[in-house]
Image (cartoon, grey):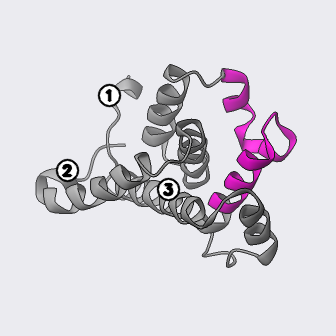
Amino acid sequence: MSARLDYNAVNPQGTRALAGLQQYVDHSGLERSLIDLVNVRVSQINGCAYCIRLHTEEAVARGESHRRLHLLRVWAEGPFSARERAALRWAEAVTAVNHAHPSDDAYTEARAQFDDQDLVALTYAAIAMNAWNRLAIAFRKPDPALAG
C-alpha cells in the first residue's frame, strides 16, 4: 500500500487545527493512561495500523502493560477499572455512531464515572483520535516503523 498524499504538506492549517484539539485533550485533566487506552482502542476499531502502533508504543513508554494492551480488544473481560471500562464503552459508542447512536446505558455509565468537564474531554479525545485515524487511513499515511 502506497501513500496517496501528504495531507499536512497540502494543508498544514488543518493539521494545526486538529493538533489544537489534541492539545486540549492532552491538557484536559484526564489521566494520560486513560487517553492512551482510548487512543489505542479507537484506532483498533478504525483499523489504523499507523495509529495503533504509535499509540501502543507511547502507552508502553508511559508505563502501560503489554498485558492490558493485548486485552484491550476485549476490555469488558480484561483487567480494567470501572472508570476505564466506562471510558472505553463511551469512546466505542462515539466512534461507532454510524451503527447506532450512543446508548443511554453507555451515557449513564460514563456519567457515573466522569464529571461534566471530564466527560466532555473524554468525548473530544474520542473525536480527535477518530479524526487522526480517518486522515491516516484516507491518505494511507506511511509508517516507517512498519516498512519492510
Q: Which residue does the numbered mark 3 point to in the structure image?
A: 125
Q: Is residue 90 magenta?
A: yes
Compared across the picture, whether 136 is left or right of 20 comes to right
Percent of width and height locating residue 78 = 82, 37
Q: Which residue does the numbered mark 2 point to in the structure image?
A: 6
Percent of width and height locating residue 62 = 51, 24
Range of residues picked out in magenta = 66-91
Q: Nearer the viewer, residue 140 or 103?
A: 103
Compared across the picture, whether 75 is left or right of 55 comes to right
Q: Amino acid at mark 3?
A: Ala
Q: Earlier in the sequence, mark 2 or mark 1?
A: 2
- Marks 3 and 1 sit apart, C-alpha to C-alpha, by 25 Å
What is the secondary structure assignment of the residue under circle 2? loop
The local crowd at label 1, few if under 14, some if 14 to 19, many if 20 or more residues have their Cα within 10 Å, is few
What residue is drawn where x is 62% and y is 59%? 91
Q: Which residue does the numbered mark 1 point to in the structure image?
A: 144
Q: Nearer the viewer, residue 29 or 70?
A: 29
CB under 8 Å between discs 3 and 1: no
* Predominant secondary structure, magenta span: helix
What residue is drawn where x is 49% and y is 26%? 57
What residue is drawn where x is 49% and y is 56%? 125
Percent of width and height locating residue 31 = 56, 41
What residue is drawn where x is 48% and y is 32%? 53
Q: Amino acid at mark 2?
A: Asp
Asked where in the image residue 97 lies, by quadrant, the reply is bottom right
Asked where in the image residue 103 lies, by quadrant, the reply is bottom right
* Quadrant that contains the N terminus: top left
Query: Which mark lies nearer to you, 3 or 2?
Result: 3
Q: Earlier in the sequence, mark 3 or mark 1?
A: 3
